[in-house]
Amino acid sequence: MALKVGDRIPEILGIDADGNEVRTSQYAGKKLVIYFYPKDNTSGCTAEACSLSDGYGALSAAGYAVIGVSKDSAASHRKFIDRYSLPFPLIADTDVRLNEAFGVWQEKKMCGRTYMGTVRTTFVTDENGVITRIITKVDTKDAANQILNGQIG
């Protein structure tokens, strides 16, 4: 069952690149941007992470905290963070539990092959962890501005 606008996100989000548990309550009083992406170090995912990194100052000033999620390992996330100097945590959702909870672990097709994978999606919450917006058509090169400009869809 996918989370939708008006739903509260789970308290325990997962484990970050340094092995620390990430909880919603750590971000009390902040709006959260939780973005799901398929894979570290791929062109679209790197563009999205860099857009959010470049816009991080403006996002923070607007009251947002940012968390990225993919099924990559903590070690992969650590390298990705270090390579691009990302200022926000990445959750290693290796068992896709969080992907499934948010409803972004779905059947995909590429080159005639059908497989399960992460559908790139951004969830925005209010200060209480309630989803206020879901961005399904993510502009990887302009992800930060999509959030700041209130885009949905």
Image: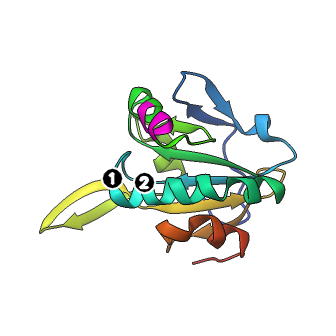
**Closer to us: 136 or 51:** 51
Asked if residue 101 can be seen in this view, the reply is yes
| Residue with the mark numbered 1 | 42
User: Do the residues under discs 2 and 1 have CB atoms within 8 angstroms?
Assistant: yes
Q: Are there few (<14), some (14-19), or many (20+) residues within 10 Å of tag 2?
A: some
* Chief secondary structure of the magenta portion: helix
**Closer to us: 146 or 20:** 146
Q: Amino acid at mark 1?
A: Thr
Per the image, is 82 magenta?
yes
Image quadrant holding the C terminus, namely bottom right
Residue drawn where x is 29% and y is 54% of the image: 116
Q: Whole-Å distance between the Cαs marked 2 and 1?
A: 6 Å
SS at badge 2? helix
Percent across and percent down for residue 5 are 68, 67
User: Taking 9 as reference, is 23 above or below it?
Assistant: above
| Residue with the mark numbered 2 | 46
Residue drawn where x is 56% and y is 54% of the image: 35
Q: Are there few (<14), some (14-19), or many (20+) residues within 10 Å of tag 1?
A: few
